[in-house]
């Protein structure tokens, strides 16, 4: 882990944006405006990577699927939370929901020298969402 942190310190600079897999396209009704704003983050990532070319600053993006956090489950009953979990579990090939550390580990990778040849990329971290992979509901 310490070597990974040393790589992070030696990088020339990076930006890691967080969008959503909705910005790429999912079969979730009623999310048009949310998806549109996340697609804008993805477009911004690609344009900024282009505009900063030659500066040594890399710009990449993570597009998470549903991640269980206080924001996504707060204020819901235990039954509602479990129904939401099951809904998203059933839509992933890994049959589980995301955890904050799933996203954090990809941020750490993108901020390190291990990704020094990546720029303008979008990494989808969504457990293999079936509607993304198959373009079906």
Image: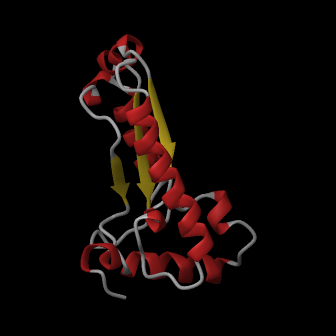
Q: Residue at x 34, y 72 (%)?
A: 129
Instruction: Tell which residue pokes out farthest to the front in this image.
Output: 51
Q: Residue at x 29, y 68 (%)?
A: 94
Q: Is residue 77 visible?
A: yes
Using the rendered view, name the quadrant where residue 27 is placed.
bottom left
* Direction from residue 43 to residue 53 in the image, left or right: left
Using the rendered view, name the quadrant where residue 7 is placed.
top left
Q: Where residue 12 appears, x then y in whole percent?
A: 39, 15
Q: Residue at x 41, y 72 (%)?
A: 25
Using the rendered view, name the quadrant where residue 104 is placed.
top left
Q: Which of 21/2 is in front?
A: 21
Q: Residue at x 50, y 75 (%)?
A: 85
**Quarter of the picture holding the N terminus:** top left
In the picture shown, does residue 83 fall above or below 110?
below
Colour mapping used in the image: secondary structure
Q: Is residue 108 visible?
A: no
In the picture shown, does residue 14 fall above or below 18?
above
Q: Which of 22/51 is in front?
A: 51
Instruction: Tell which residue pokes out farthest to the right in this image.
Output: 75
In the picture shown, does residue 2 fall above or below 83?
above
Q: Where residue 122 appears, x then y in whole percent?
A: 36, 49
**Quarter of the picture holding the C terminus:** bottom left
* Direction from residue 55 to residue 71 in the image, left or right: right
Q: Where residue 130 appears, x then y in whole percent?
A: 30, 77
Q: Where residue 50 appears, x then y in whole percent?
A: 38, 35
Q: Which of 39/123 is in front?
A: 39
In the picture shown, does residue 20 fall above or below 15?
below
Total tally of numbered discs in the picture: 0
* Direction from residue 94 to residue 98 in the image, left or right: right
């Amino acid at each position: 882990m310490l070597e990974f942190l040393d790589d992070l310190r030696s990088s020339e600079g990076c930006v890691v944006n967080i969008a959503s897999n909705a910005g790429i396209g999912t079969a979730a009704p009623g999310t048009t405006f949310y998806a549109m704003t996340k697609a804008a983050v993805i477009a911004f990532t690609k344009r900024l990577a282009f505009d900063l070319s030659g500066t040594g600053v890399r710009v990449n993006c993570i597009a998470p699927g549903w991640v269980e956090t206080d924001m996504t489950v707060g204020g819901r009953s235990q039954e509602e939370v479990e129904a939401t979990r099951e809904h998203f579990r059933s839509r992933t090939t890994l049959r589980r929901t995301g955890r904050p550390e799933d996203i954090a580990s990809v941020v750490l990778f993108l901020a390190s020298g291990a990704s020094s040849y990546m720029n303008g990329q979008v990494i989808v971290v969504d457990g293999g969402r079936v509607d993304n992979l198959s373009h079906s509901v």
